[in-house]
Image: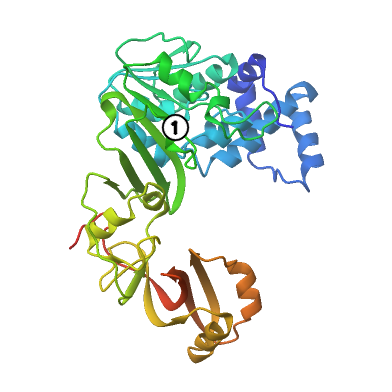
Amino acid sequence: MAYTFSLDDVAFLRSREGDEALAACSTLALTEASRLSDVATVRRLVGAERAAAVLETALLRRKAEAKVDGGGRWLFTDEAVQQASASPVARYRASRLAGRDVHDVTCSVGADLVALARTAGRCVGSDVDDVRLAMAAHNCAVSEVAPVLVRADALRPVTRETVVVADPARRDSSGRRRWRPEDFAPALDDLAEAYAGRDLMVKCAPGLDPAAAPWAREVELISLDGRVREASLIGGGLATATRRATVLRSDGSAWSITDAEPDDVPVGEVGDWIVDPDGAVVRAGLVRHYAARHGLRQLDPRIAYLTGDTPPPGVRAFRVLDSGRYSEKTLRALLRRHDVGRLEILVRGVDVDPDALRRRLKPRGSGEASVVITRIGRAATAYLCRAERIPGRPDARQG
């Protein structure tokens, strides 16, 4: 069970003594094997009463450092770390609201609030949890931003004419994930009702069915470094499209595509390259729009793999070396013909477990390849490819 922090814990952790204890903990191993010695060390530093809060904070900071900029100096709860947006995602979301007056009505410990405060005209953060508000005050201070912080129920508006940002809790008291929008805290429909007529942006899990939020005029899927991280449900005047996919990289590059772009693309035979669009594009239902932007075509109208003679810049694409109707027998023959020993398997539209297939194939060659297995019409086809990183800016257009 995760440690439950008190306001007294937060006050201690923000004190000079607490700060020094946390600095001392930064050199501890903090592993399962070192648990007993770590506990003994911290108890010598701060006493048994404070040890649990200090150790938990040290562990949470380690978890957060790769996710939240400056997380090594922040205060967290376990749930707050899990639900916090990665900093590049938070910064992107804030950039959509730059210059506006913004109210984060579920600010928690401030992962989104800090980013919002750096770009907003004026910024307010509120939460019903006093402990998280106290942590947010610390995190804002060390991040050198100063939004207004107030204790308030997200469903009882305390600001006017602000853009409302919300991130409903999606775990219950035992830490289990909630999947139904009516079980979020606060529920999606309740948020929409409380802020009817207001510009509203609600962060949620990327797997949420958009039909669960009929009030949302725009649904945006956001990925970071190839992994789909979250979705934003956008209502009011903030919406500029119905569907949007935004692709972010840790190097700072970013691009978006919406359903306002053309989607008239052909279906045809495989070309020199196969392109697997970013997951945000696929989940947002914008594969055809992406293909039209980059002069590609579909291998099959129901499958997200695209093909063409020139892949988009900045992506990892697959140069086609050979192909054949898929069966394990014919795939083994392809691997022997090309002397493949190290094999990446990508699957879409067919019932194949890549890991299990790799174990059965037991490739023994000296080379490396990728195989794309997909359905073309009613038949499964295997394409033997070489994966390559295409040079150029990933948001450059062509075609």
Residue extending farthest to the left is 399
Q: Position of residue 228 (x, y in %)?
A: 45, 48
Q: Nearer the viewer, residue 285 or 113?
A: 285
Residue 394 visible in image: no
Tell me the quadrant of the picture where the N terminus can be found.
top right
What is the x, y in percent for residue 34? 77, 45
Q: Would you call the spot at circle 1 few (<14 residues within 10 Å), some (14-19), or many (20 or more)?
A: some
Residue at 55% of width from left, 27% of height from top? 169
The answer to whether 351 is drawn above or below residue 207 in the figure is below
Q: Quadrant of residue 96?
A: top left
Q: Residue at image x 54%, y 36%? A: 72
Which residue bears the numbered disc 1? 203
What's the residue at 46%, 74% (across, down)? 379
Residue lying farthest to the bottom in this orientation:
337
Coloring basis for residues = rainbow
Q: Quadrant of residue 166?
A: top left
Q: Is residue 219 left or right of residue 351?
A: left
**Amino acid type at mark 1:** Lys
Q: Position of residue 132 (x, y in %)?
A: 56, 20
Quadrant in which residue 174 is drawn: top right
- Residue 382 located left or right of residue 196: right
Tell me where residue 224 appears, x and y as whole percent: 42, 48
Q: Considering the numbered disc 1 on the image, is that residue within a helix, a strand or a loop? A: strand
